[in-house]
Image (cartoon, rainbow, N blue to C red):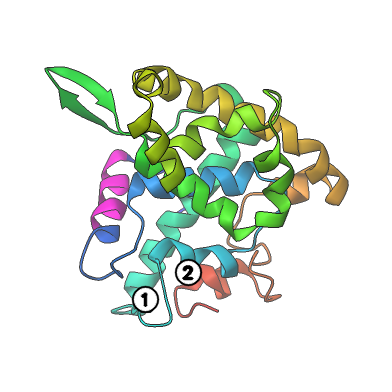
Amino acid sequence: MNPDTPLTDEELDELDQFLLSDATPEECMDIAMLDGFLTALVIGPNTIMPSQWLPAIWGETEEEEMVWDSAEQTRRILGLVMRMYNDRVQDLHEEIDAYDPLIYQSQHEGKPVPILDEWCMGFIRAIQLDPEGWQPMVAADTQEAGGLLTPMLLYGTEEGWNELKENQALADRHQDFADAIGPCVIGIRDYWLPQRKEAATYRRETAKVGRNDLCPCGSGKKYKKCCGSGEKLH
């Protein structure tokens, strides 16, 4: 399968079912959380290698590691994850108008209500992989910088959940925050883009992973012989 091919709805369901299955650690992300996580990785201040962020997807800890049933399973699931990552690169660095966060909805009194917690928790998990890099934006109190993270901090952190519980006026703006996530993502992308360009060329920083490209984990091997082979994680 071409690594540039976006996931179909059926493949998204397949990946989500795997993430929620007994085959993964208890703290594994679901598909909405994964989308928020990958989005933050793509638009953040620094490029994070898959060898750093893949374990965070599964929620691995010292007590519980991800155990794959077979090389076939590893190859299939990692292939889906990397295609999802590449799709977010495409949406956020090449076809920005196509970006739409993967946020599910529930029903409340017969009306659809966006479920923001999982997506925002995934975004925050990516920030936690590079806290020093994100610090200027997290610490900012201006609308230009810090305001862009408001939905993610409210719905993706314990402090934010407590604030929503204690401030009904804030909680009543749920739909406003849901509508703001897409524009905030684009704003964050624009905020960090000069830094990413300064660190390396734009195309190298945002290049999609092809099977014959060097693996982004930094091993020096081709992607198809490394993370893309499914034979091992490193």
The answer to the question of whether label 1 and label 2 lie on touching residues, with beta carbons closer than 8 A, is yes
Q: Which residue is mark 1?
A: 66
Q: Amino acid at mark 2?
A: Pro
Q: Position of residue 128 (x, y in %)?
A: 57, 56
Q: Amino acid at mark 1?
A: Met
Q: Quadrant of the C terminus?
A: bottom right
Which residue is labeled 2 in the image?
55
Residue drawn at x 87%, y 45% is 198
Residue 141: image quadrant is top right
Q: Is residue 230 magenta?
A: no
Say if 109 sits above or below 62 in the image. Answer: above
Can residue 132 be seen at all in this image of the molecule?
A: yes
What's the distance in space between the residues labelled 1 and 2, CA to CA?
Answer: 8 Å
Does the segment drawn in magenta span residue 11?
yes
Q: Residue furthest left?
A: 110
Residue bounds of the magenta highlight: 9-17
Residue in the image at 65% along x and 57% along y: 130
Q: Residue at the spot x=33%, y=33% of the render?
A: 165
Q: Quarter of the image containing the N terminus?
A: bottom left
Under circle 1, the secondary element is loop
Q: Furthest-front residue in view?
A: 166
- Residue 197: percent from left, percent from top: 83, 43
Nearer to us in this view, 31 or 218: 31
Could you tell me residue 136's position as x and y percent?
A: 74, 43
Query: Residue at the right extreme?
Result: 198
Residue 102, quarter of picture: top left
